[in-house]
């Protein structure tokens, strides 16, 4: 299978964020909130309980960039390649 799991949630009626993209690999988990332009990044090997958000930690910048790249790849792979059709009804 794939080396990652991807999920998304839009227009949630609860919580401080209304949308989220999550990418989880064996080594890390990235939660990105595109409307707020903030994220959470967890190093799953060093922090399996996900208690320490290292998203803004300069020491984890490479991991964050790699996870963002993988996230964009996942989002692109899930997009419908056929443009929406406009009709008159």
Image (spheres, rainbow, N blue to C red):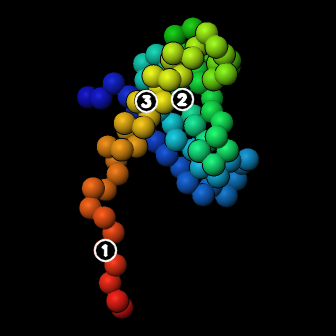
Q: Secondary structure at mark 3?
A: helix
Q: Give x and y (percent) for residue 15.
A: 72, 48
Q: Nearer the viewer, residue 62 or 27?
A: 62
**Front of the two marks 2 and 1:** 1
Q: CA distance from mark 1 to mark 3?
A: 30 Å
Image x and y of residue 46, in percent: 57, 8
Looking at the picture, how far across and down is residue 69, in whole percent?
Answer: 43, 30
Q: Is residue 61 left or right of residue 71?
A: right
Quick one: quadrant of the C terminus?
bottom left
Above/below status of 17 relative to 49: below
Horizontally, is 41 left or right of 8 in the view? right
Q: Earlier in the sequence, mark 3 or mark 2?
A: 2
Mark 3–mark 2 Cα distance, whole angstroms, equals 11 Å
Crowd band around label 1 with a 10 angstrom C-alpha radius: few (<14), some (14–19), many (20+) = few
- On the question of residue 51 being in view, the answer is yes
Q: Which residue carries the number 2 mark?
A: 30
Which residue lies at the image location 30% right of the left edge and 29% below the top edge? 2
Residue at the spot of label 1: 85
Q: Earlier in the sequence, mark 1 or mark 3?
A: 3
Tell me the residue that label 3 is attached to. Answer: 69
User: Residue at 60% of width from left, 58% of height from top?
Assistant: 11
| Of labels 3 and 2, the one closer to you | 3
Q: Is residue 89 depicted above or below 12 in this figure?
A: below
Q: Is residue 44 above or below residue 68?
A: above
Cα separation between marks 2 and 1: 34 Å
Crowd around label 3: few <14 · some 14–19 · many ≥20 (10 Å):
few
Q: Residue at x 32, y 43 (%)?
A: 77
């Amino acid at each position: 299978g794939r080396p990652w799991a991807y999920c998304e949630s839009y227009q949630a009626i609860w919580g401080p964020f209304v949308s989220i993209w999550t990418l989880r690999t064996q080594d890390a988990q990235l939660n990105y909130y595109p409307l707020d332009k903030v994220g959470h990044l967890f190093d799953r090997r060093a922090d399996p309980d996900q208690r320490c958000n290292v998203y803004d930690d300069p020491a984890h910048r490479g991991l964050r960039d790699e996870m963002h790249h993988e996230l964009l790849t996942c989002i692109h792979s899930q997009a419908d390649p056929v443009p929406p059709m406009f009709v008159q009804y």
